[in-house]
Image: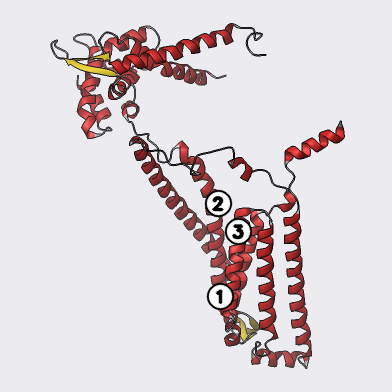
């Protein structure tokens, strides 16, 4: 008797309070009925073993499943985590590297900075991955909970995409020609590169210049640019940064070249070259101290004009190649696998 | 194939038909432990703990009616088919007959029958 009582208590305490009493009575009636009159403790034990773990039995009474994220959303959950965690970790690491460089420029030895950076990077990556995991899981658990309540109330279930799966969805994921494809890694590198040069631009005064061995290791003796002149171009540079980031994200999401993307690329690249040209054509862009040092070093400033001209030419050339490649890849016609097969069959037979 | 995976299929097979087995026995009122004993005797119920939750679910779905009989020294809850339960039983039974029939063809046939 005492054992059955405790067993039923173990089952019902796991159930909603309003159902406890009813279920307890039903279960007790069925279980006691299966024992002979005046049963021994041994017989009682055998019966309990047949009924098994009370937690499992309680689970069979629950209408709510015992999971956080169900099969309807699990696939999407994993897919999102696989995308979001690497992207966020990469961005955090890039930001960490850049800020470390600026914070320590000319102040500490390179080795200590690198050692500290590695430690910081590991802990930051771990930290941000945990954060993403937690928040994404929380959001999905809430979605699951809302969806469960909805379905219990007889409302239609949540679905991604909105109308449920149809064969049309296959088209978007159809295998694309390799020549048109943009690797995720390429888009990520572009994004990091954009972050790096934007950071360099906005911090050039603290960072870009001539370094010499001083009493505290390397010290910057003069910045390269006249920071106030350089910064006067900030609206233009900011516009280019925004365009570039938008394009990099577009590449990440779309993963292939098409005419729209190639045209966007044309606009962004042209604007970048134009800004580059405008900034370096300005005679006041270089800091006076920097020019004086160069003059000391080379005897005259003639070489500088050639160097700047060469850099502008190189940048323009590479941009032109990039623009051309974009349009070339966008123009590659996609052959549906079926058509290719038909063609092969025709020539073959 | 190892034994445990076979066990899984065997109990899954019985789980699928347990509701039908219960419905079939409730044209006249019956109480929980009697059902357990009957189904265990027939080898249809491997885990007696599965029955009380199933009875409760069927009662919640209004396929069964449940009435407590408190006249004996042990109170018992008698379950019986409701009208909807009888309807559900007929449908499930039809499905079951079709399934067993077709399955029998598949198991006994030599593969030359049916669609070519």
State whether residue A73 is above or below residue A212. Answer: above
In the shown orientation, is residue A132 left or right of residue A149? right
Quadrant assignment for the C terminus of chain A:
top right
The image quadrant of residue A11 is top left
Element at badge 2?
Answer: helix
Which residue is rendered at x = 86% and y = 35% of the image? A347
Of A69 and A149, which appears nearest the observer?
A: A149
Q: Which dot marks residue A83?
A: 2
For the residues bearing labels 3 and 2, Cβ distance under 8 angstroms: no
Whole-percent x, y for residue A19 in the image? 23, 30
**Residue at position x 74%, y 92% in the image:** A295
Distance from disc 3 to disc 2, alpha carbons, whole Å, reads 14 Å
Residue under disc 1 on the same chain as residue under disc 3: yes
The local secondary structure at tag 1 comes to: helix
Q: Which residue is mark 1?
A: A102
Looking at the image, is mark 3 or mark 2 earlier in the sequence?
2
Give x and y (percent) for residue B73: 14, 11
Sort mark 2 into few (<14), some (14-19) or many (20+) by Cα contacts within 10 Å: few
- Label 1 marks a residue whose chain is A
Which chain's residue wears label 2? A
- Which quadrant of the structure image shows residue B50? top left
Occupied quadrant, residue A151: top left
| C-alpha separation, residue under disc 2 versus residue under disc 1 | 29 Å
């Amino acid at each position: 008797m005492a054992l059955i009582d405790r067993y039923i208590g173990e089952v019902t305490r796991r159930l909603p309070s309003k159902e406890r009493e009813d279920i307890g009575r039903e279960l007790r009636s069925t279980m006691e009925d299966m024992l002979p009159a005046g049963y021994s403790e041994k017989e009682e034990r055998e019966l309990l073993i047949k009924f098994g773990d009370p937690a499992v039995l309680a689970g069979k009474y629950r209408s709510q499943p015992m999971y956080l994220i169900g099969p309807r959303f699990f696939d999407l959950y994993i897919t999102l985590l696989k995308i979001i965690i690497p992207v966020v970790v990469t961005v955090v690491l890039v930001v960490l590297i850049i800020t470390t460089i600026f914070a320590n420029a000319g102040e500490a030895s390179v080795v200590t900075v690198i050692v500290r950076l590695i430690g910081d990077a590991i802990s930051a990556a771990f930290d941000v991955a945990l954060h993403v995991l937690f928040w994404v899981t929380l959001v999905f658990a809430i979605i699951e909970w809302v969806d469960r309540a909805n379905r219990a109330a007889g409302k239609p279930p949540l679905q991604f995409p909105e109308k449920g799966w149809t064969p049309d969805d296959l088209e978007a994921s159809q295998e694309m020609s390799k020549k048109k494809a943009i690797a995720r890694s390429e888009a990520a590198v572009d994004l990091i590169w954009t972050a790096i040069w934007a950071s360099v631009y906005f911090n050039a005064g603290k960072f870009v210049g001539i370094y010499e061995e001083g009493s505290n290791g390397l010290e910057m003796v003069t910045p390269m640019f006249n920071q106030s002149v350089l910064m006067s171009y900030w609206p233009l540079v900011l516009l280019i940064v925004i365009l570039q980031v938008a394009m990099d994200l577009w590449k990440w999401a779309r993963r292939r070249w098409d005419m729209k993307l190639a045209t966007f690329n044309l606009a962004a690249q042209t604007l970048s070259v134009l800004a580059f040209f405008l900034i370096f054509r300005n005679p006041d862009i270089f800091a006076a101290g920097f020019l004086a040092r160069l003059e000391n070093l080379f005897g005259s400033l003639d070489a500088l004009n050639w160097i700047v001209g060469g850099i502008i030419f190189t940048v323009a050339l590479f941009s032109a190649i990039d623009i051309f490649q974009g349009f070339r890849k966008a123009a590659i016609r996609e052959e549906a696998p079926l058509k290719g097969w038909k063609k092969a069959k025709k020539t073959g037979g | 194939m190892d034994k445990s995976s076979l066990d899984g299929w065997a109990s899954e097979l019985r789980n699928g038909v347990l509701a039908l087995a219960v419905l079939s026995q409730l044209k006249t009122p019956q109480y929980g432990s009697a059902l357990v004993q009957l189904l265990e005797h027939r080898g249809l119920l491997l885990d007696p703990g599965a029955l009380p939750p199933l009875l409760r679910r069927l009662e919640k779905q209004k396929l069964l009616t449940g009435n407590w009989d408190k006249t004996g020294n042990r109170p018992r809850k008698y379950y019986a088919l409701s009208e909807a339960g009888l309807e559900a039983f007929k449908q499930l039974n039809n499905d079951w007959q079709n399934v067993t029939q077709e399955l029998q063809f598949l198991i006994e046939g030599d593969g030359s029958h049916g669609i070519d």
